[in-house]
């Protein structure tokens, strides 16, 4: 379902709640259904969105994650990530990089066609590039993905060009061959940027000025596409119906129709059980009950993301304590994370000790087992920084009361229970953590975004990140990254650890990082640094639990999404 | 009558003005705005503050509140409710899709309420303290004390999940040739309208029973009986006509109430109406949609009151249009 995760190429994208995470239905490669019966063609598969989707279906245009999911079924990017998180052929079936690592040359698969049978050419690729770098997209429409090509030669600092202007770094070498030259070598450029270039049908969109794409007939209902399923009808707020693309480059899908339905999370389990929904993510705590439903199978796979407890390090009241590494280490030891996973997610989750989850290809295995639950060690660390116990509660080193508050978003019972557990475990080491009444997520954002002086009420908070295929930490972890500033604010330029963090991140994508062993070593050092520094308290990686009808076969569940929908098929009975 | 209606309609204007001023002020007092949610935590936007400021300027949110309000009123008078920050669609388009769905749901629920609630109430009064009255009264109290969304889940469980007779979501069936046919739409309407109606059915039953009992003991009913009229004629001609007057008033008030009351049920049944639109708009600080939906809810309530007054005046000759 999340085939276009590559779009979020650098660090991460916010997950608003476990609801969304669960919804994503990310399965596991290991759980792919083995079925020896002959494959059947035809049938209708029903997938779900928990709330309404947006109505802009031109790639990259919609701000709705659900629309992006549906769009990803209709438009393929030039390369894809396979179940092992490696780049593999899609619309482009061959590529090479020049010795100076600046120019990438790509060859379009001769079999790549649009759903109307016409061949995909470099003119379509060019239109996709022009769109991502256009003024209309980046200035008027927000341009959340313009960054993908910001390193291409000829792209100005603003990050965009006049509509229809192609950057000098993009060259058409033939009807099926093109090259992209970068401004500077970057080991993450292909997986975290260029791979997501998405050809757009020049035969249709080439005739419309880009300023008029949004809201155009094609935007509201794209009748031609390059992905496995092409949209046939859209009922706003209710459903998107897609039919199999007979010319799909990776093979005609077995399933004839795919329907995305908006279905309330309150009833999705029942719809799965009654067979009205074919596949959907469910809450982990419902897994045991859903296992008993005779017509359903379950898939449990880790996600490529994690939950964390953040502290505003610049907080005017308690920032002096939050900023101490030993305080954050004490918190990590104080939290019984395996117990929390068991209670909150029925055991479906993994303890997280660094910025990448254990499932990630680039994960540093040396982090395994660090920060095992140890309240005695937590107490010792807190004692060592002068936080004495007075009337049962720890004080600041200067003797003032230490009563930090945890801010949580409303409307998510799991987050509230998470907060209760954290409070319980911190109270056990005499930290008097108070939980503020839950507030709207937008209010949390507002407080985080306007806390430059550390005087906003937010002190500790619970958030989660869903990571992209490539572990490029830029955008999130550098001291200059906006997202770092507005969340944990681990940005003190005089801190040697932060200086080292920036240096390692820089080295993880430079020229030397084209050598995979070098990149692994650098990212390992970076993960070890963050494991030791704990700029935020890493909690756990919640697994994604997906329930699907027993008549659905061939799904490749991975931490990066449910892959290869063209290979899925529906048997005729349960 | 016409001048009365016109006077009442004109009287709505200052009320609506006050409502919009209050909503506009409260909306801006809420922390955050739509663009912070859309842009604020995107790791790839280099200067989020600049982008947010630019998008706020594009949407006129950098102007003073009074100026924004005046602009909104001017646009409203031109039939322009603005563009949704979240969906990037004209608000009129969004409401044009959502409002008919909600009105259909509310009116169907109202129909169910009247068709079931009135006869049961009358028969309860006619057989007061008998088996029918006691059993249906107990049932009515049960219905009235359970929130509509519980009924919704219960109805879905029985009729959709277990029996698979009726769909549990949406207004039409996707990906079938009969999608959107009248029969298809009615099928989708039954469960949400019933769930919305059930608590009110109980209320109307109790109301109708009490009104009917009150009228039963009036002198003119006794006189009618003394004249030897058949009990059916007394009931329908003399009792019901008078007992139903408070119900018609309630009916008018309920029009606005049901539209607002459908909010939670619309979420459960994924009914793409005003409820879901309103909740999303409020959570995402989508100001143009918040204002438009509030305005529409307010208009519905005020019109409902007006209809109630007109119905009352037309049914009760003692009430005059003044």
Image (cartoon, coloured by chain):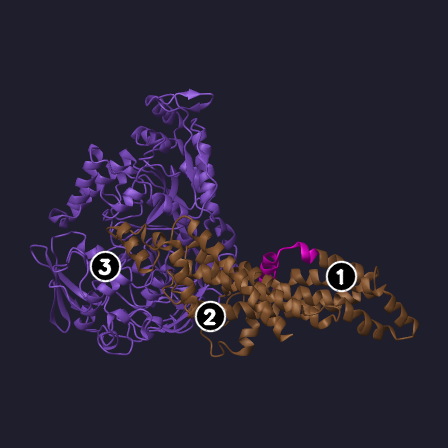
Chain colours: A purple, B brown
- Let me know if residue A517 appears in the view: yes
Residue B151 colored magenta? yes
Mark 2, residue position = B97
Q: CA distance from mark 2 to mark 3?
A: 32 Å
Residue A459, horizontal then vertical, whole percent: 38, 37
Q: Which residue is mark 3?
A: A146
**Residue bearing the label numbered 1:** B136
Both labels 2 and 3 in a single chain: no
Residue A504 lies in quadrant: top left
Q: Residues within 10 Å of mark 2 (few under 14, many from 20)?
A: some
Q: Nearer the viewer, mark 2 or mark 3?
A: 2
N-terminal-most mark, 2 or 1: 2
Gap in Å between the C-alphas at discs 2 and 1?
39 Å
Q: Which residues are magenta?
A: B142-158
Secondary element under disc 3, as helix, strand or loop, is helix
* Residue B182 % position (x, y): 54, 78
| Magenta-drawn stretch, dominant element (helix, strand or loop) | helix
Residue at the spot x=42%, y=30% of the render?
Answer: A403
């Amino acid at each position: 379902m999340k085939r276009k995760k590559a779009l979020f190429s650098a660090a991460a994208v916010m997950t608003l709640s476990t609801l969304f995470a669960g919804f994503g239905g990310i399965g596991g490669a290991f759980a792919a259904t083995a079925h020896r019966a002959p494959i059947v063609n035809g049938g209708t598969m029903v997938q779900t969105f928990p709330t309404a989707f947006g109505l802009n279906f031109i790639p990259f245009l919609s701000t709705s994650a659900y629309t992006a999911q549906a769009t990803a079924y209709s438009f393929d990017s030039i390369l894809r990530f396979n179940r092992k998180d490696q780049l593999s052929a899609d619309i482009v079936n061959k590529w090479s990089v020049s010795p100076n690592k600046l120019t990438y040359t790509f060859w379009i698969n001769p079999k790549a066609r649009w759903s109307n049978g016409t061949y995909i050419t470099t003119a379509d690729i060019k239109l996709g590039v022009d769109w991502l770098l256009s003024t209309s997209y980046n200035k008027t429409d927000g341009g959340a993905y313009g960054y993908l090509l910001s390193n291409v030669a000829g792209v100005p600092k603003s990050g965009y060009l006049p509509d229809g202007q192609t950057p000098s770094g993009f060259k058409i070498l033939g009807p099926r061959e093109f090259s992209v030259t970068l401004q500077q070598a970057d080991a993450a450029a292909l997986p975290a940027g260029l791979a997501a270039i998405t050809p757009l049908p020049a035969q249709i969109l080439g005739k419309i000025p880009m300023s008029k794409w949004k809201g155009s007939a094609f935007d509201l209902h794209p009748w031609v596409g390059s992905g496995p399923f092409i949209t046939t009808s859209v009922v706003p707020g209710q459903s998107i119906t897609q039919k199999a693309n007979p010319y799909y480059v990776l093979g005609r899908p077995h399933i004839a129709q795919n329907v995305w339905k908006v279905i309330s999370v309150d009833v999705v389990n029942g719809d799965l059980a009654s067979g009205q929904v074919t596949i959907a993510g469910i809450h982990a705590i419902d897994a045991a009950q859903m296992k008993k439903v005779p017509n359903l199978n379950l898939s449990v796979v880790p996600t490529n993301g994690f939950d964390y407890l953040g502290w505003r390090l610049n907080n005017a009241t308690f920032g002096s304590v939050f900023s101490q590494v030993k305080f954050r280490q004490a918190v990590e030891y104080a939290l019984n994370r395996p117990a929390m996973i068991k209670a909150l997610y029925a055991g479906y989750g993994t303890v997280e000790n660094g910025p990448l989850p254990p499932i990630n290809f680039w994960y540093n295995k040396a982090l395994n087992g660090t920060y095992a639950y140890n309240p005695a060690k937590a107490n010792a660390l807190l004692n060592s920084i002068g936080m004495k116990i007075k009337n049962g509660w720890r004080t600041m080193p200067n003797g003032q009361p230490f009563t930090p508050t945890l801010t949580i978003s409303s409307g998510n019972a799991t987050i509230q229970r998470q907060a209760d557990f954290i409070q319980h475990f911190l109270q056990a080491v005499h930290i008097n953590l108070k939980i503020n009444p839950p507030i709207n997520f937008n209010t949390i954002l507002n407080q985080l975004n306007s806390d430059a002086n550390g005087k906003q009420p937010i002190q500790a908070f619970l958030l989660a990140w869903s990571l992209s295929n490539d572990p490029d930490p830029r955008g999130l972890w550098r001291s200059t990254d906006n997202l770092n500033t507005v969340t944990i604010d681990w940005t003190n330029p005089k801190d040697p650890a932060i200086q080292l963090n920036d240096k390692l991140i820089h080295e993880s994508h430079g020229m030397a990082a084209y050598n995979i062993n070098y990149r692994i070593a650098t990212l390992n050092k970076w993960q070890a640094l963050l494991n030791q520094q704990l700029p935020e308290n890493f909690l756990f990686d919640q697994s994604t639990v997906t329930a699907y009808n027993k008549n659905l076969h061939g799904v490749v569940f991975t931490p990066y999404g449910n892959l290869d929908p063209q290979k899925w098929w529906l048997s005729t009975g349960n | 009558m016409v001048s009365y209606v016109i006077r009442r309609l004109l009287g709505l204007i200052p009320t609506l003005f006050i409502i919009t001023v209050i909503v506009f002020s409260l909306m801006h007092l809420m922390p955050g705005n739509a663009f912070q949610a859309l842009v604020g935590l995107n790791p790839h936007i280099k200067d989020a503050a600049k982008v947010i400021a630019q998008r706020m300027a594009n949407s006129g949110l950098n102007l003073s509140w009074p100026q924004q309000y005046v602009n909104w009123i001017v646009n409203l008078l031109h039939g322009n409710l603005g563009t949704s920050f979240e969906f990037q669609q004209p608000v009129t388009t969004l409401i044009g899709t959502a409002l008919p769905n909600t009105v259909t749901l509310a009116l169907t629920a109202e129909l169910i309420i009247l068709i079931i609630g009135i006869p049961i109430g009358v028969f309860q009064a006619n057989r007061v303290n008998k088996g029918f009255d006691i059993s249906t009264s107990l049932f009515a109290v049960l219905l009235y004390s359970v929130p509509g969304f519980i009924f919704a889940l219960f109805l879905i469980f029985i009729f959709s999940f277990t029996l698979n007779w009726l769909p549990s979501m949406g207004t039409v069936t996707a990906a079938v040739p009969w999608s959107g046919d009248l029969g298809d739409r009615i099928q989708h309407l039954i469960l949400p309208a019933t769930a919305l109606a059930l608590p009110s059915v109980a209320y109307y039953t109790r109301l109708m029973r009490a009104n009917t009992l009150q009228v039963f003991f009036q002198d003119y009913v006794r006189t009618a009986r003394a004249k030897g009229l058949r009990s059916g004629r007394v009931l329908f001609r003399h009792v019901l006509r008078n007992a139903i007057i408070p119900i018609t008033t309630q009916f008018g008030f309920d029009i606005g109430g049901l539209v607002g009351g459908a909010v939670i049920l619309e979420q459960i049944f994924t009914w793409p109406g005003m409820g879901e639109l309103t909740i999303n708009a409020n959570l995402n600080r989508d100001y143009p949609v918040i204002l438009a939906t509030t305005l529409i809810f307010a208009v519905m309530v005020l019109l409902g009151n007006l209809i109630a007054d007109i119905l009352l005046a037309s049914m009760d000759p003692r009430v005059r249009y003044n």
